[in-house]
Amino acid sequence: MNASILCDQSEEFVFGVVERFRQVEEQLENAIGGQIDAVLGVNGQPYLLRTAQGRLLESVAAERRASQLHSSIINALPAPVALLNAAGVIVAVNQAWTQRAAHSRLGPGCEVGRRYVEVCGLDLHATLSEVERAQLGINQVLIGKIDQYTQEYSCSSECGTEWFKLVVSPLQSGITEGAVVMHVDVTDQKTAELESRTHAAFPSYNSHPVLAFSKGGRLVYRNRAATHLLEEFGGEILPADLHASLAECLTSGCGKLLETKLGTRTLSWSFQPIPDEEIVHCAATDVTELLSLEAQLRQSQKMETVGQLAGGIAHNFNNLLTVVIAHASRLSAQSSAPEIVLNSAARITEVAKRAADLVRQLLAFGRRQVMELKSLDLKIVLESTATILRQVLNADIAVRVEWPPNLPCVRADHMMLEQVLLNLAVNARDAMPEGGELVIRADAVEVSTLEARQQQGGSAGEFVRLTVRDTGCGMTPDVLAKVFEPFFTTKDVDKGTGLGLATVYGIMQQHGGWIEVRSELGRGTTFQIYLHRAPAPPVLVAEAENPSSQPIAVVPADARILLVDDEPLLRGVVIQILEGAGYEVVAAGSGPEAIQCWLARGGDINLLLADMQMPGGMSGRVLAAELRRWKPELPVILTSGYTGEMVGCAASLGSKDAFLQKPYPMEKLLDMIRCAMQRVDGR
Amino acid sequence: MSPLILRLYIAGSSPNSVQALANLRGICRSLLREEPQIEIVDVLDAPQRALGDGVWISPTLIRIHPLPVRRIIGNLSDQQAMVDALNLSIRNNS
């Protein structure tokens, strides 16, 4: 029958058949209760019942909707997801996977049908060992051995390092139908982790102890340095009132500084509250060195002050001593005086000289000495030093001073060299509290270029070497390394200045020489100083060192001397001495007054004897320069009780000028005047 | 004791067929002492098997062994009826 064209009759027939068909279906369903789907025709063709067909269509549509929903969800995931079958072959992937694959070496669409591990190795740039681990994990999921496998891995690209977390879950738990593989990008999380680890390293590796305490005083963090400290000393490193300090910091929100003592060391604590977290950060610094430096600074400032004070006292004191010595000299000169008077005068002179020595030492301490380099016979220095040492050192220290015959002279300052030897000897004494032997030896040496290179500050050439050796306790290498550093001392604060050896070092440098030190613990210490050789001093200079010991001779002279000094007592006695020697004296108390006297006499003055430091705004030097404008050949003798004034002004003294250090013996003054006059006359 | 052998005739993924299969699995898992041997036959794929077994309606469950052969038509939602009809030996604790 042609199905496409139906006539009215056949339409009626078809309707009847369909109606019957429907009734049969209804009877069937009624008989069995709506629980059947299909019937089989006698020809063996299955017929799906109407209701089953409808429901099947519905369920297919629902399944399709669900499938679409699921794929939407899967595609919405930013992580690449792949579905593997039981053999580990990729059967489906999401959009994120496709997009990633498109930019990989695989090319788009090539991943389905390939083994996952192959793709993973190529696409994700993972290392071989990581791929092997992943394969093992996936296999375990596929055979149902584990419920989930995760693995973190990194891969590097031109954009930097990316971190992923591989998550493998079974497709259906317990049944080996396949697995879902997901690659979650954890780069941000990993970067943050690394960053936080890097930041955590700052306090962790800080060499200062860092701790954190909770509000209740519980230790919530400590770095390595703090751990070491706590292990070594326990809780005593912490401030005693820890709890109160923590509470105070958190309440006020302000930091706090505290100090703790740990044996000989001092720790400074900085407490810093973090109110939001209710903890307090505590950082400690070992301030022992700092405090010690502060103490050293105070000590050095004290010494500087004492030095200035000494200089000031020395000036006035030397003036007074000059007066005392002058009067004693006058008494001594009275040959007719009773013996008791002469004896007393001699004693006064002796004591005044000792007082002058004391002032000199005071000035040496204040480092206000003038250096005068000249050819020096070491023997004289060694003899005088040995004499002093035998007097000042304890009897249980044997002093041996040796030098060879024909010892060359050195270029040095006598006083300074004596100071060097004394400082070294004092050091040796302190190293030998139980007694021992102190040997001072001088010898002539020749230093080769090679030897000079091995010695700090050394140079090649001919030298005189002074060796100071003790049999004392010696020094450790640590102490030895710092021995010449200013303020370095192993003695108590009040006992040593830490300047003794530093001064020696400085003096040697001033002399163009150098010093070496060797020491052995328990065996002793040896200092060796190297001084430049010098030609033997002329006999004349050697004599000048020893002032004439003749009594004051009254030498008639018609010379007129202008005496300028602000100290009336000194003026008085010097006038008497000079007049006694036959000079005419014009005295003045200041520079301006001296100029008036000069003008009043019409410049008829043969010599100017002036103190360097005077009130009235005009020093002896300025006065001399003023007077020389009228009389350039005027001989000048400048005196001072304070050698500090000579520092740096030696060059400004003319060749006609002489300098006389107060206090001076009257004989020396008269000698100097005679010399100055003769020089003018002999010109 | 010889094993229980069952054969379930279904019509593809039709609703009652899917239901029957799920119900049968549920009963086997929760009620039966031992796992029966089950064969699933889709009449849409193999109508001749149905003809051979004289099965005209899907879903139909046949007890092949032990004899005699018994048949149940429908989606097997009535557990008790099934147990009675097939004379199944069930667990004591259930």
Image: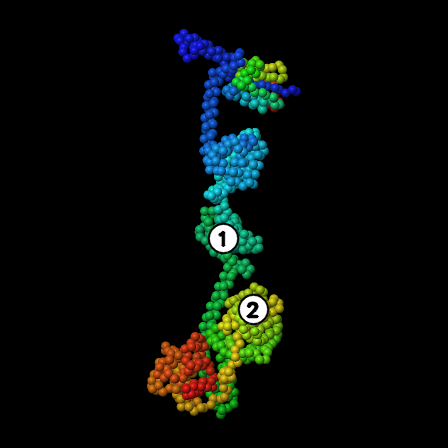
Q: Residue at x 62, y 14 (%)?
A: B68
Say which residue label 2 marks.
A450
Residue flagged by tag 1: what amino acid is it? Cys
Q: Residue at x 61, y 21 (%)?
A: B37
Q: Nearer the viewer, residue A37 or A251?
A: A37
**Residue A330: % across, % down:** 46, 87
SS for dot 2 = helix
The picture places residue A592, in percent across and down from the top left corner, at 35, 80
Q: Chain of mark 2?
A: A
Q: Reply above or below: A220 against B73.
A: below
Please tell me the numbered disc located at residue A282. Answer: 1
Q: Is residue A149 visible?
A: no
Q: Quadrant of the C terminus of chain A?
A: bottom left
Expressed as whole percent of the image width and height from the top left, the position of residue A654 reads 41, 80
Outermost residue, bottom direction?
A336
Q: Label 2: how many residues lie within 10 Å, few (<14), some (14-19) or many (20+)?
A: few
